[in-house]
Amino acid sequence: MSEEEKAEESKSGSLMSHLVELRDRVVRMVVAVLVLFLGMFYWANEIYIYLAEPLTRHLPEDATMIAIDVASPFLTPFKLVLMLAVFLAMPVILYQMWAFVAPGLYATEKRIAGPLLVSSILLFYAGVAFAYYAVFPLVFGFFTSVGPEIVNISTDIGRYLDFVLALFFGFGLAFEVPIATIILVAIGFTTPKKLSEKRPYVIVGAFICGMLLTPPDVISQVLLALPMWILFEAGLIASAIIFKDREEAEEDDELDEDAAADHPLTDEEMEAELDQAEADEAGLDKNA
Protein backbone atom coordinates (compact mmCIF):
# COMPACT_ATOMS: atom_id res chain seq x y z
CA MET A 1 0.00 0.00 0.00
CA SER A 2 1.39 3.37 -1.04
CA GLU A 3 1.83 6.33 1.28
CA GLU A 4 -1.02 8.20 -0.42
CA GLU A 5 -3.40 5.27 0.11
CA LYS A 6 -2.39 5.04 3.77
CA ALA A 7 -2.97 8.77 4.23
CA GLU A 8 -6.34 8.53 2.50
CA GLU A 9 -7.37 5.57 4.67
CA SER A 10 -6.25 7.40 7.83
CA LYS A 11 -8.22 10.47 6.81
CA SER A 12 -11.32 8.38 6.09
CA GLY A 13 -11.03 6.61 9.45
CA SER A 14 -10.64 9.92 11.26
CA LEU A 15 -13.74 11.32 9.52
CA MET A 16 -15.78 8.26 10.46
CA SER A 17 -14.67 8.49 14.10
CA HIS A 18 -15.74 12.15 14.19
CA LEU A 19 -19.12 11.29 12.68
CA VAL A 20 -19.63 8.49 15.21
CA GLU A 21 -18.74 10.85 18.06
CA LEU A 22 -21.12 13.49 16.69
CA ARG A 23 -23.91 10.91 16.48
CA ASP A 24 -23.32 9.81 20.06
CA ARG A 25 -23.40 13.38 21.36
CA VAL A 26 -26.57 14.22 19.42
CA VAL A 27 -28.20 11.12 20.90
CA ARG A 28 -27.25 12.31 24.38
CA MET A 29 -28.82 15.71 23.68
CA VAL A 30 -32.04 14.10 22.48
CA VAL A 31 -32.14 11.74 25.48
CA ALA A 32 -31.69 14.66 27.89
CA VAL A 33 -34.56 16.58 26.27
CA LEU A 34 -36.76 13.46 26.17
CA VAL A 35 -36.17 12.62 29.84
CA LEU A 36 -37.07 16.16 30.93
CA PHE A 37 -40.10 16.21 28.65
CA LEU A 38 -41.49 12.93 29.98
CA GLY A 39 -40.82 14.01 33.54
CA MET A 40 -42.78 17.27 33.14
CA PHE A 41 -45.56 16.24 30.77
CA TYR A 42 -47.85 15.06 33.59
CA TRP A 43 -47.86 18.61 34.99
CA ALA A 44 -48.22 20.32 31.59
CA ASN A 45 -51.48 22.07 32.49
CA GLU A 46 -50.13 23.30 35.83
CA ILE A 47 -46.99 24.63 34.09
CA TYR A 48 -49.13 26.50 31.58
CA ILE A 49 -51.23 28.01 34.38
CA TYR A 50 -48.02 29.23 36.04
CA LEU A 51 -46.83 30.71 32.73
CA ALA A 52 -50.16 32.48 32.18
CA GLU A 53 -50.30 33.91 35.71
CA PRO A 54 -48.82 37.34 34.76
CA LEU A 55 -51.74 37.79 32.34
CA THR A 56 -54.57 36.18 34.31
CA ARG A 57 -53.65 38.31 37.32
CA HIS A 58 -54.74 41.41 35.37
CA LEU A 59 -57.83 39.95 33.70
CA PRO A 60 -61.31 40.92 34.97
CA GLU A 61 -62.91 38.46 37.39
CA ASP A 62 -65.31 37.06 34.78
CA ALA A 63 -62.68 36.82 32.00
CA THR A 64 -60.87 33.59 31.07
CA MET A 65 -58.45 32.42 28.43
CA ILE A 66 -59.92 30.63 25.44
CA ALA A 67 -58.87 27.99 22.89
CA ILE A 68 -59.78 28.85 19.30
CA ASP A 69 -58.50 25.64 17.72
CA VAL A 70 -60.01 22.28 18.63
CA ALA A 71 -56.64 20.68 19.53
CA SER A 72 -55.20 23.71 21.35
CA PRO A 73 -56.07 22.49 24.88
CA PHE A 74 -53.73 19.55 24.28
CA LEU A 75 -51.17 20.85 21.77
CA THR A 76 -50.41 24.14 23.53
CA PRO A 77 -49.33 22.63 26.89
CA PHE A 78 -47.51 19.92 24.90
CA LYS A 79 -45.56 22.58 22.98
CA LEU A 80 -44.84 24.47 26.19
CA VAL A 81 -43.40 21.41 27.95
CA LEU A 82 -41.30 20.52 24.89
CA MET A 83 -39.83 24.02 24.71
CA LEU A 84 -39.24 24.00 28.47
CA ALA A 85 -37.44 20.66 28.20
CA VAL A 86 -35.11 22.08 25.53
CA PHE A 87 -34.63 25.17 27.68
CA LEU A 88 -33.71 23.18 30.81
CA ALA A 89 -31.52 20.78 28.83
CA MET A 90 -29.50 23.62 27.35
CA PRO A 91 -26.51 23.09 29.69
CA VAL A 92 -26.31 19.47 28.53
CA ILE A 93 -26.72 20.46 24.87
CA LEU A 94 -24.05 23.13 25.04
CA TYR A 95 -21.69 20.87 26.98
CA GLN A 96 -21.98 18.16 24.31
CA MET A 97 -21.28 20.72 21.61
CA TRP A 98 -18.33 22.04 23.62
CA ALA A 99 -16.93 18.54 24.21
CA PHE A 100 -17.10 17.84 20.46
CA VAL A 101 -15.15 20.94 19.36
CA ALA A 102 -12.84 21.31 22.40
CA PRO A 103 -10.12 18.89 21.16
CA GLY A 104 -9.50 21.16 18.18
CA LEU A 105 -9.02 24.32 20.26
CA TYR A 106 -5.79 25.80 21.59
CA ALA A 107 -5.16 25.97 25.32
CA THR A 108 -5.76 29.73 25.40
CA GLU A 109 -9.04 29.30 23.51
CA LYS A 110 -10.19 26.62 25.96
CA ARG A 111 -9.32 28.85 28.90
CA ILE A 112 -11.58 31.61 27.54
CA ALA A 113 -14.31 29.48 25.97
CA GLY A 114 -15.16 27.52 29.13
CA PRO A 115 -16.16 30.51 31.29
CA LEU A 116 -17.89 32.12 28.31
CA LEU A 117 -19.99 29.00 27.80
CA VAL A 118 -21.12 28.93 31.43
CA SER A 119 -21.74 32.68 31.44
CA SER A 120 -23.82 32.52 28.26
CA ILE A 121 -26.12 29.90 29.81
CA LEU A 122 -26.56 31.89 33.02
CA LEU A 123 -27.16 35.13 31.12
CA PHE A 124 -29.79 33.51 28.90
CA TYR A 125 -31.61 32.20 31.98
CA ALA A 126 -31.32 35.65 33.56
CA GLY A 127 -32.89 37.21 30.47
CA VAL A 128 -35.84 34.83 30.58
CA ALA A 129 -36.33 35.41 34.32
CA PHE A 130 -36.17 39.18 33.79
CA ALA A 131 -38.85 38.92 31.09
CA TYR A 132 -41.19 36.84 33.27
CA TYR A 133 -40.83 38.64 36.59
CA ALA A 134 -40.18 42.24 35.48
CA VAL A 135 -41.50 42.74 31.95
CA PHE A 136 -44.65 40.61 31.84
CA PRO A 137 -46.42 42.28 34.78
CA LEU A 138 -45.85 45.73 33.27
CA VAL A 139 -46.74 44.76 29.71
CA PHE A 140 -49.90 42.80 30.53
CA GLY A 141 -50.99 45.33 33.13
CA PHE A 142 -50.73 48.04 30.48
CA PHE A 143 -52.46 46.02 27.74
CA THR A 144 -55.43 45.05 29.90
CA SER A 145 -56.00 48.60 31.18
CA VAL A 146 -55.94 50.66 27.98
CA GLY A 147 -58.68 48.91 26.00
CA PRO A 148 -62.25 50.16 25.71
CA GLU A 149 -64.55 49.08 28.52
CA ILE A 150 -66.91 47.35 26.10
CA VAL A 151 -64.14 44.95 24.98
CA ASN A 152 -64.12 41.58 26.72
CA ILE A 153 -60.52 40.41 27.07
CA SER A 154 -60.23 36.70 26.26
CA THR A 155 -56.80 35.65 25.04
CA ASP A 156 -56.23 32.50 23.01
CA ILE A 157 -53.88 30.10 24.81
CA GLY A 158 -51.88 29.34 21.66
CA ARG A 159 -51.33 32.96 20.74
CA TYR A 160 -50.37 33.79 24.32
CA LEU A 161 -47.74 31.05 24.28
CA ASP A 162 -46.30 32.33 20.99
CA PHE A 163 -46.22 35.85 22.44
CA VAL A 164 -44.34 34.91 25.61
CA LEU A 165 -41.93 32.58 23.78
CA ALA A 166 -41.00 35.47 21.46
CA LEU A 167 -40.32 37.66 24.49
CA PHE A 168 -38.32 34.91 26.21
CA PHE A 169 -36.17 34.44 23.12
CA GLY A 170 -35.70 38.17 22.65
CA PHE A 171 -34.65 38.86 26.22
CA GLY A 172 -32.51 35.72 26.47
CA LEU A 173 -30.69 36.71 23.28
CA ALA A 174 -30.32 40.33 24.40
CA PHE A 175 -28.67 39.26 27.64
CA GLU A 176 -25.88 37.64 25.60
CA VAL A 177 -24.52 41.09 24.67
CA PRO A 178 -21.56 40.91 27.13
CA ILE A 179 -20.53 37.54 25.68
CA ALA A 180 -20.68 38.92 22.13
CA THR A 181 -18.63 41.93 23.20
CA ILE A 182 -15.92 39.80 24.79
CA ILE A 183 -15.77 37.48 21.76
CA LEU A 184 -15.34 40.41 19.36
CA VAL A 185 -12.46 41.70 21.44
CA ALA A 186 -10.96 38.22 21.88
CA ILE A 187 -10.73 37.54 18.14
CA GLY A 188 -9.14 40.93 17.55
CA PHE A 189 -12.05 42.33 15.57
CA THR A 190 -12.16 45.44 17.75
CA THR A 191 -10.95 46.84 21.08
CA PRO A 192 -12.76 48.14 24.18
CA LYS A 193 -11.54 51.64 23.35
CA LYS A 194 -12.98 51.53 19.84
CA LEU A 195 -16.25 50.08 21.11
CA SER A 196 -16.59 52.82 23.70
CA GLU A 197 -16.20 55.38 20.91
CA LYS A 198 -19.13 53.74 19.09
CA ARG A 199 -21.43 53.96 22.14
CA PRO A 200 -24.06 56.25 20.46
CA TYR A 201 -24.45 53.76 17.61
CA VAL A 202 -24.72 50.89 20.08
CA ILE A 203 -27.53 52.66 21.95
CA VAL A 204 -29.44 53.23 18.72
CA GLY A 205 -28.83 49.60 17.74
CA ALA A 206 -30.16 48.42 21.12
CA PHE A 207 -33.46 50.21 20.54
CA ILE A 208 -33.62 48.82 16.99
CA CYS A 209 -33.08 45.31 18.37
CA GLY A 210 -35.79 46.01 20.94
CA MET A 211 -38.12 46.90 18.11
CA LEU A 212 -37.29 43.74 16.12
CA LEU A 213 -37.11 41.17 18.93
CA THR A 214 -40.24 42.16 20.85
CA PRO A 215 -43.91 42.58 19.98
CA PRO A 216 -44.93 46.04 18.72
CA ASP A 217 -45.33 47.84 22.03
CA VAL A 218 -43.17 50.59 23.46
CA ILE A 219 -42.89 49.15 26.98
CA SER A 220 -41.27 45.84 26.03
CA GLN A 221 -39.03 47.57 23.49
CA VAL A 222 -37.68 50.00 26.09
CA LEU A 223 -37.37 47.28 28.74
CA LEU A 224 -35.27 45.26 26.28
CA ALA A 225 -33.13 48.13 24.97
CA LEU A 226 -32.08 49.46 28.39
CA PRO A 227 -30.71 46.12 29.70
CA MET A 228 -28.88 45.65 26.38
CA TRP A 229 -27.17 49.00 26.85
CA ILE A 230 -26.26 48.23 30.47
CA LEU A 231 -24.98 44.78 29.53
CA PHE A 232 -22.93 46.29 26.71
CA GLU A 233 -21.21 48.52 29.26
CA ALA A 234 -20.62 45.46 31.45
CA GLY A 235 -19.10 43.66 28.48
CA LEU A 236 -16.79 46.61 27.85
CA ILE A 237 -15.57 46.57 31.45
CA ALA A 238 -15.09 42.78 31.43
CA SER A 239 -13.21 42.77 28.12
CA ALA A 240 -10.99 45.63 29.27
CA ILE A 241 -10.06 43.63 32.40
CA ILE A 242 -9.59 40.28 30.62
CA PHE A 243 -7.47 41.67 27.78
CA LYS A 244 -5.71 44.39 29.76
CA ASP A 245 -2.20 43.08 28.98
CA ARG A 246 -2.91 42.90 25.27
CA GLU A 247 -4.30 46.42 25.24
CA GLU A 248 -1.24 47.77 27.03
CA ALA A 249 1.06 45.99 24.57
CA GLU A 250 -0.83 47.46 21.61
CA GLU A 251 -0.68 50.93 23.13
CA ASP A 252 3.09 50.58 23.63
CA ASP A 253 3.49 49.53 19.98
CA GLU A 254 1.48 52.53 18.86
CA LEU A 255 3.64 54.82 21.00
CA ASP A 256 6.81 53.31 19.51
CA GLU A 257 5.46 53.78 15.98
CA ASP A 258 4.51 57.38 16.73
CA ALA A 259 7.94 58.03 18.20
CA ALA A 260 9.62 56.51 15.18
CA ALA A 261 7.49 58.64 12.88
CA ASP A 262 8.27 61.79 14.84
CA HIS A 263 12.02 61.06 14.95
CA PRO A 264 13.17 59.54 11.63
CA LEU A 265 16.60 57.90 11.48
CA THR A 266 19.58 59.99 10.43
CA ASP A 267 21.89 58.89 7.61
CA GLU A 268 24.46 57.59 10.10
CA GLU A 269 21.81 55.61 11.99
CA MET A 270 20.45 54.21 8.73
CA GLU A 271 23.93 53.06 7.64
CA ALA A 272 24.51 51.48 11.04
CA GLU A 273 21.22 49.59 10.76
CA LEU A 274 22.17 48.33 7.28
CA ASP A 275 25.64 47.26 8.44
CA GLN A 276 24.13 45.38 11.36
CA ALA A 277 21.62 43.64 9.08
CA GLU A 278 24.41 42.61 6.69
CA ALA A 279 26.53 41.34 9.58
CA ASP A 280 23.63 39.28 10.91
CA GLU A 281 22.99 37.83 7.45
CA ALA A 282 26.69 36.97 7.01
CA GLY A 283 26.69 35.24 10.39
CA LEU A 284 23.67 33.17 9.42
CA ASP A 285 25.32 32.13 6.12
CA LYS A 286 28.49 31.08 7.96
CA ASN A 287 26.53 29.01 10.46
CA ALA A 288 24.60 27.39 7.62
Image: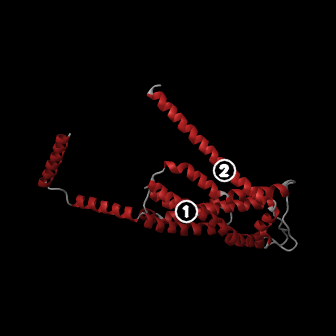
Figure check: 27 above or below 219: above
- The residue under the point 63% across, 56% down is 92
Figure check: 181 above or below 284: below
Which quadrant: the C terminus? top left
Q: Which residue is mark 1?
A: 177
Kind of residue at disc 1: Val
Q: Which residue is mark 2?
A: 28
The picture places residue 62, in percent across and down from the top left corner, at 88, 72
- The residue under the point 68% across, 60% down is 88
The foreground one among 193 and 89 is 89
The foreground one among 127 and 34 is 34
Figure check: 49 above or below 30: below
The picture places residue 18, in percent across and down from the top left corner, at 57, 42
Q: In the image, which is nearer the foreground, mark 1 or mark 2? A: 2
The reply, left or right, for residue 139 in relation to residue 180 is right
The reply, left or right, for residue 26 in relation to residue 236 is right
Q: Residues within 10 Å of mark 1 (few under 14, many from 20)?
A: many
